Image: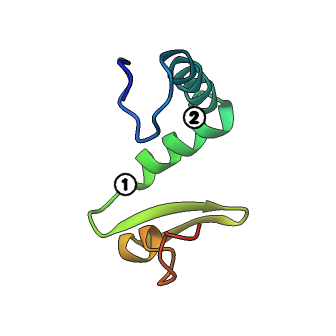
């Protein structure tokens, strides 16, 4: 792996890693994402579920289902 200050699973060049980090930061700081983060903090998280923001509100999804793609696995996502 090339030397880069960013720890990524992808093996990106230092320039590509830097650009990806900048894109990710811009994406995380949009108004929509900030609003969702604030809503998550108001609702509160527990150790067994993740919160999903849908058009009609927020749903609690079990971590097992969320990270396991509802039993279909994540290999073919």
Quadrant housing the N terminus = top left
* Front residue (pair 25, 57): 25
Q: Residue at x 47, y 39 (%)?
A: 10
Residue at 60% x, 39% y: name it.
33
Tell me what residue is drawn at x 46 percent, y 70 percent.
66
Distance from label 1 to label 2 (Cα)?
15 Å
Circle 1 sits on which residue?
Answer: 44
For disc 2, the marked residue is: 34
Q: Nearer the viewer, residue 15 or 62?
A: 15
User: Where is residue 31 shown, x and y percent of the image?
Assistant: 67, 31
Q: Position of residue 35 (x, y in %)?
A: 60, 39
Q: Going by the picture, which residue comes out furthest to the front?
A: 1
Q: Position of residue 77 (x, y in %)?
A: 59, 66
Q: Which residue does the image show at 37% across and 75% down from the upper left?
A: 64
Left or right: 63, with 47 as reference point: right
Measured along the vertical axis of the image, is residue 32 above or below residue 4?
A: below
Q: Residue furthest right?
A: 55
- Quick one: label 2, few (<14), some, or many (20+) residues within 10 Å? few
Neighbor class of circle 1 (other Cα within 10 Å; few <14, some 14-19, many 20+) is few
The secondary structure type at the circle numbered 2 is helix
């Amino acid at each position: 792996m090339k030397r880069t200050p960013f720890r990524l699973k992808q093996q990106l060049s230092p320039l590509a890693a830097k650009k990806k980090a900048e894109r990710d930061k811009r994406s995380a700081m949009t108004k929509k994402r900030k609003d969702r983060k604030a809503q998550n903090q108001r609702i509160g998280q527990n150790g067994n579920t993740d919160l999903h923001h849908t058009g009609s509100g927020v749903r609690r999804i079990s971590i097992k289902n969320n990270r396991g793609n509802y039993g279909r696995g994540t290999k073919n996502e």
